[in-house]
């Protein structure tokens, strides 16, 4: 047998999969925000194209504030330029759905020209309701461009709060 040299190629060591910590963190935060009906980090900071809340004609979903006290949860949404007739708040199963539509029309007629411009936009936001919300007593109030939705807690949920004494050692 002839001695023929054989080239031995050494394969690069297999890369051990290192988790992408940022992606993992972002995914966990998105799940947490979704749980409370908030926009995900991707949508808030426009990390990915096409992940903005659904809208038309660049009319985006309204910013909201969530708060809670002993008796109720409150959702406050800024809706400047909307009329109460163009706002729809409904409870369907375990979801609170907020819809709105904005219409703007501008028309100018002069002796030698006519100008007409129309734009329409709509949004929809949905929030998962906690079991402690009394769905029959949900109320909404619209004043000066701000919508306040009050989600009263059930009597049982109001009585469940228990103060825990913190001891120092």
Image (cartoon, grey):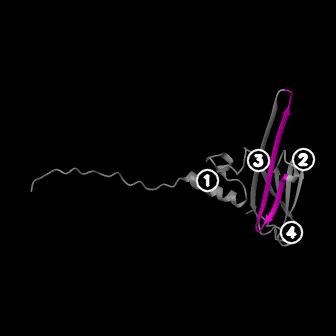
The tag on residue 72 is: none
Front disc: 4 or 1: 4
- On the image, the x and y values in percent for residue 161 come to 82, 68
- On the image, the x and y values in percent for residue 67 come to 81, 56
Front residue of this view, candidates 109 and 48: 109
Mark nearer the N terminus (4 vs 1): 1
- On the image, the x and y values in percent for residue 64 come to 78, 52
Left or right of 102, for residue 20:
left
Mark 3 — residue? 121
Secondary structure found at label 2:
loop
Mark 2 — residue? 144
Front disc: 3 or 4: 3
Mark nearer the N terminus (1 vs 2): 1
Mark 1 — residue? 26
Q: Name which residue lies at 22% across and 50% down.
A: 7
Callout 3 touching callout 1 (CB < 8 Å): no
> Does residue 121 appear anywhere in the picture?
yes
Mark 4 — residue? 136
Residue 91 within the segment the image draws in magenta: yes
In the image, farthest residue toward the top: 112
Q: State which region is magenta.
A: 86-111
- On the image, the x and y values in percent for residue 1 come to 9, 57
Secondary structure found at label 4:
helix
Mark nearer the N terminus (4 vs 2): 4
Mark nearer the N terminus (3 vs 4): 3
> Does residue 134 appear anywhere in the picture?
no
Left or right of 82, for residue 125:
left
Q: What secondary structure predominates along the stretch shown in magenta?
A: strand
């Amino acid at each position: 047998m002839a001695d023929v040299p054989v080239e031995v190629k050494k394969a690069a060591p297999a890369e051990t999969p290192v988790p992408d910590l940022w992606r993992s963190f972002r995914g966990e935060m998105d799940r947490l925000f979704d749980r409370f009906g908030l926009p995900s980090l991707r949508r808030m900071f426009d990390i990915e194209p096409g992940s903005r809340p659904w809208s038309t004609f660049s009319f985006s979903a309204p910013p909201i504030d969530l708060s809670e006290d002993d008796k109720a949860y409150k959702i406050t949404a800024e809706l400047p330029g909307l009329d109460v007739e163009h706002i729809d708040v409904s409870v369907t199963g375990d979801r609170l759905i907020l819809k709105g539509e904005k219409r703007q029309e501008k028309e100018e007629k002069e002796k030698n020209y006519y100008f007409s411009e129309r734009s329409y936009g709509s949004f929809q936001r949905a929030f998962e309701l906690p079991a402690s919300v009394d769905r029959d007593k949900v109320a909404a109030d619209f004043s000066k461009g701000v919508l306040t939705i009050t989600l009263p807690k059930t009597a049982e949920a109001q009585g469940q709060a228990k103060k825990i004494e913190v001891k120092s050692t």
